Amino acid sequence: MAGGPTTPELVSAVSNAGGFGQFGAAYLKGKEIKDMAHKVQNNTNKGFGINLFIPQNPTCTAQDLTKATSAISNYYDLFDIKPPDNISNTTPNFDEQLQAVIKSGTKLCSFHLGLPMKSDIEALKAVGILTTVSVTSVNEAKQAEDLEVDFIIAQGSEAGGHRGTWTGDWRNSMTGILSLLAQLKQTISTPIIAAGGIMNGSSMAAAMMLGAVGVQMGTAFLTCPEAGVNSHYKQALLNAVDDNTIVTQTFSGRPARGLRNKYIDEMEKSGAYTLPFPLQNILTSDLRKAASKENDTDYMSMWCGQAASLSRGIPAVKLIETILKEYEEACNKVEE
């Protein structure tokens, strides 16, 4: 959950409550990662993790930018702002990020959107940092296992935020978490962490019974008071009924699951041209910031998973206590 939701307060609260907090540091520079880690450590003596995105380095022609800008200019006009004249990849330097992680005191580094280099994994292991990679298919899991990571995160189709697919078309890697987990258990021996649509103790129990050694939860924590999420975004999650999510590339240029809103519906209907990630994400940045400032959820990227309607809006400590109680109850019912 890069870009603001995972505050030091949320990460430390989760770890203090018996979970394992992770900070989404994909958009942070090296010094910012060190500062963030220091703030987390000021609030907990428990372990925590840091998540990075594997670099994406697309190209963009002037014609591409013109088409993408034309598609969103009307939305910028609504907030009396102008889209950028030029786009450059402002993603922080990955090597600097990795070095900051190595020096941060974190216990685990997770990677999303691809595979790190073997040398990156070795550098992390050399200082005692555990490693894990997100996968969305059996093929990706096999490649991750060959890299000798400590854990593999299985991202089911239900998951919120950016799809982690890095081999083939993402549409061919939209397997639900329980089906994906069952297949991976037949294929790999690396311990698996299940992710996607897990919001309570019973779904956690289901994943564990299929062989997961743990679960990764994101959406469940977005409505916690410690999360760095716009209050209207939080309320939209709490008001969600059934599944009102969609996987769209219109905000960031990469398929990501979030709540439907006016911007997504109109952009999807028109088939508007979008730049590849992270260029589209940079192009829409000021629009999303303006919408958040005005509390206008029609133009905010509200990433979340398919079970967002189960959001509770309670402190992280209470949420973890509740989930663990539900998990125990679910396990006891199975034993009966």
Image: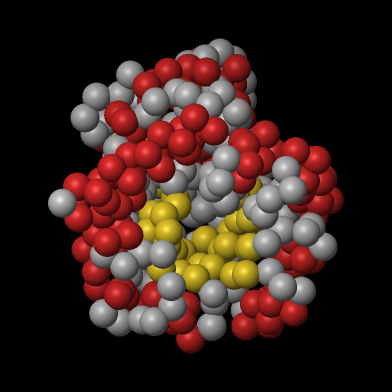
Q: Is residue 335 left or right of residue 325?
A: left
User: How many numbered marks are there?
Assistant: 0
Residue at x 52% of width, y 61% of height:
112
Residue in front for this viewpoint, 296 or 106: 106
Q: Position of residue 196 (x, y in %)?
A: 35, 50
Residue in front for this viewpoint, 292 or 131: 131
Q: Is residue 312 visible?
A: yes
Q: Is residue 102 left or right of residue 236?
A: right
Q: Which residue reaches farthest front?
A: 336
Q: Position of residue 229 (x, y in %)?
A: 55, 27
Residue at x 74% of width, y 48% of height:
45
Q: Position of residue 130 (x, y in %)?
A: 62, 70
Vertical order, 80 against 15 (above or below): above
Q: Which residue reaches farthest left?
A: 336
Q: Is residue 61 left or right of residue 332?
A: right
Q: Position of residue 106 (x, y in %)?
A: 72, 58
Vertical order, 212 against 115 (above or below): above
Vertical order, 134 against 60 (above or below): below
Quadrant of res 242: top left
Which quadrant: the N terminus? top right
Q: Is residue 248 visible?
A: no
Q: Which residue reaches farthest bottom?
A: 146
Residue at x 46% of width, y 81% of height:
145
Vertical order, 111 against 77 (above or below): below
Residue at x 29% of width, y 37% of height:
307
Q: Is residue 276 left or right of residue 205?
A: right
Residue in front for this viewpoint, 291 or 34: 34
